[in-house]
Amino acid sequence: MKFTADNYKSGFLVDEELMAGITDSENPGHFVGYVVRHTTGETLGAHEYSNLFEAIRAINDIPRSWEFESVKRCGGGNCGNGKCGAGGGCGKGAS
């Protein structure tokens, strides 16, 4: 899965070694794309972009086997029409 304009605030892209994300910059209307080594906390790179779509493209173009890791959990309306599952995840029909 890759970042989109709808999900970039909802999680990170991760693999066995790295984590990538996009956050709002201190400069209004700008965004910072970053990559960290999640095993050490080391920042490998960060760059400010003048618009969201440049930041999304830059992160999505990194040739990694990314998985999207959501920071939103079940409950509080985060599941939409789904129900909370045993592991706290969301899924239709889970109890």
Image: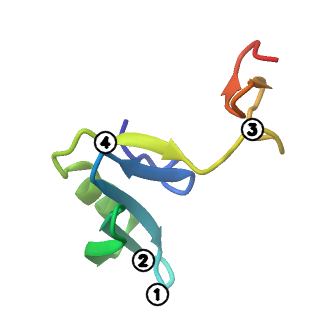
Badge 3 local density, few (<14 within 10 Å), some, or many (20+)?
some
Across and down, in percent, residue 62 comes to 19, 52
Q: Quadrant of residue 44?
A: bottom left
Helix, strand, or loop for circle 3?
A: loop
The one nearer the camera, 19 or 32, is 19
Distance in Å between CA atoms under marks 3 and 1: 32 Å
User: From the viewer's perspective, is 80 left or right of 8?
Assistant: right
Q: Residue at left 75%, top 23%?
A: 82
Question: Which residue is denoted by mark 1 in the rendering?
Answer: 27
| First reached walking from the N terminus: tag 4 or tag 3 | 4
As displayed, is residue 51 above or below residue 74?
A: below
Mark 2: amino acid: His
In the displayed structure, 85 sits above or below 10; it is above
Label 1 element class? loop
Q: Residues within 10 Å of mark 1 (few under 14, many from 20)?
A: few
- Specify which label sits upstream in the sequence, 3 or 1: 1
For the residue pair 2 and 43, the one nearer the viewer reads as 43
C-alpha distance separating marks 1 and 4: 28 Å
Task: Give the residue pinned by disc 2.
Answer: 30
Name the image quarter holding the C terminus. top right
